[in-house]
Image (cartoon, rainbow, N blue to C red):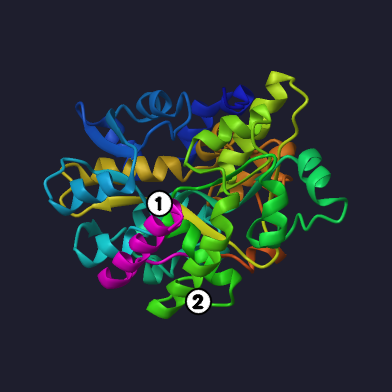
């Protein structure tokens, strides 16, 4: 069960009456308008949707998906019937090029003034000029670990703030005795390995992927498994001692361990060499059947009083700088949730690659996972 502080919802309706844009107010007064939203599974606050309907009078049709491939497949064929979609920054270039998205009119989004310019600048590498998307939630990829077991394996001088902890063969061999998990995602792991080797994380050079493959094949005997969800439970239970994965997943493991009272400690490291930063963004579809209502939903989520409880519930930071003071101190001051400025400077966004490089990356990953 994720952490959620209900006190942030106190007075929400009253505050939103002041904060919501004129577009939202107009929609609320109309006869039974609706908005159709497509979001990742379990990626919203427990009362957000009901609060939106109560504040605006707009009926909400809400569906979920569980992979970027499912999302892109539905959108690229057209006629999805959705208005607002939560799309990853990695998918944006493909969707923009395909003409699937409608430019956002920031004049109709009163909440856009709350967005963090630093994050918008990073997002612009996938959405030039920030024309089509605004940040919803974001996070990083790094290392979750059990400090007691890691120090027992590597000693007091274990490089906890470096990719050496996981990508140095001598270290990984020792850590394999207590269990190592790696995110099963070539699009997210291979850029980390390339960057570690001093190569461009979004490289289009086949020779770079051969170098990444060589390193990963050396490390493969010491990796317990590749998985995108199992490591959360295993870290929390102490069944593994280290994992490469998403920041929010590691914080979920940390919370689960605390709630279990099993004596396991989980910490998260954002390596000093740099790491991927990712965004889940709010976009309006070009063929949205209810574009005005779609904008009203996006604007609703841009209000600080709305997005702050979602961060509290999901342990992922949001793109709204004015929401930060509303978030509990233990969350907003946690560098694993909100990295400090010096760490932000080292983060890089991932890019879609040419088809031939995507095929090379897929083959590399298949060989690494099989160990051949």
Element under label 1?
strand
Question: Of helix, strand and loop, which mostly describes the magenta segment?
Answer: helix
Nearest the camera: 187 or 89? 187
Magenta residues (range): 349-372
For the residues labelled 2 and 1, the Cα–Cα distance comes to 24 Å
* View extreme (right): residue: 156
Is residue 117 in view from this perspective?
no
The residue nearer to you, when weighing 304 against 49, is: 49
Left or right? Give the position of 77 relative to 208: left
Q: What element carries label 2?
A: loop
Q: Where is residue 91 in the image (x, y as percent from the top left)?
A: 33, 58
Would you place residue 85 above or below residue 261 in this image?
below
Label ID, residue 200: 2
- The structure residue drawn at horizontal position 47% and vertical position 67%, both measured from the top left corner, is 213
Crowding at label 1, few (<14), some or many (≥20) Cα neighbours within 10 Å?
many
Task: Return the x and y of residue 194 as percentages of the image width and height.
Answer: 52, 70
Label 2: how many Cα within 10 Å (few below 14, some 14–19, many 20+): some
Front tag of 2 and 1? 2
Q: On screen, 45 above or below 155?
A: above
User: Residue at left 27%, top 63%?
Assistant: 94
Residue 57 visible? The answer is yes
Outermost residue toward the front in this view = 372
Q: Name the residue under label 1.
A: 281
Q: Quadrant of the N terminus?
A: top right
């Amino acid at each position: 069960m994720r952490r959620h502080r209900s006190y942030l919802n106190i007075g929400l309706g009253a505050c939103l009456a002041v904060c919501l844009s004129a577009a939202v107010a107009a929609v609320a007064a109309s006869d039974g308008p609706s908005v159709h939203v497509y979001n990742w599974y379990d990626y919203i606050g427990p009362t957000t949707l009901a609060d939106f309907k109560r504040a605006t009078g707009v009926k909400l049709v809400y569906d979920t998906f569980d992979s970027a491939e499912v999302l892109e497949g539905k959108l690229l064929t057209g006629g999805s019937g959705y208005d607002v979609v939560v799309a990853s920054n990695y998918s944006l270039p493909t969707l923009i090029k395909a003409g699937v998205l409608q430019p956002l009119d920031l004049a109709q989004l009163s909440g856009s003034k709350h967005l963090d310019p630093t994050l918008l600048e990073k997002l612009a590498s996938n959405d030039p000029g920030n024309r089509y998307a605004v940040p919803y939630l974001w996070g990083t990829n790094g290392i979750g670990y059990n400090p007691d077991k890691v120090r027992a394996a590597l000693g007091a001088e274990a490089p906890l703030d470096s990719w050496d902890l996981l990508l140095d063969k001598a270290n990984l061999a020792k850590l394999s005795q207590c269990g190592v998990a790696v995110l099963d995602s070539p699009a997210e792991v291979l850029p980390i390995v390339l960057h570690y080797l001093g190569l461009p994380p979004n490289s289009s050079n086949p020779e770079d992927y051969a170098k990444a493959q060589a390193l990963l094949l050396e490390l493969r005997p010491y990796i317990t498994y590749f998985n995108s969800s199992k490591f959360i439970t295993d870290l929390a239970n102490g069944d593994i001692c280290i994992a490469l994965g998403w920041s929010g997943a590691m914080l979920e493991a940390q919370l689960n361990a605390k709630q279990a009272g099993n004596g396991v400690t989980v910490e998260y490291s954002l390596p000093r060499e740099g790491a991927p930063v990712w965004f889940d963004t709010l976009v309006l579809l070009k063929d949205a059947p209810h574009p005005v209502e779609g904008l009203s939903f996006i604007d609703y989520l841009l209000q600080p009083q709305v997005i702050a409880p979602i961060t509290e519930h999901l342990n992922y930071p949001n793109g709204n700088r004015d929401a930060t003071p509303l978030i509990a101190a233990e969350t907003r001051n946690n560098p694993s949730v909100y990295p400090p400025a010096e760490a932000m400077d080292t983060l890089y966004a991932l890019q879609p690659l040419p088809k031939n490089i995507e095929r090379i990356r897929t083959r590399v990953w298949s060989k690494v996972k099989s160990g051949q």
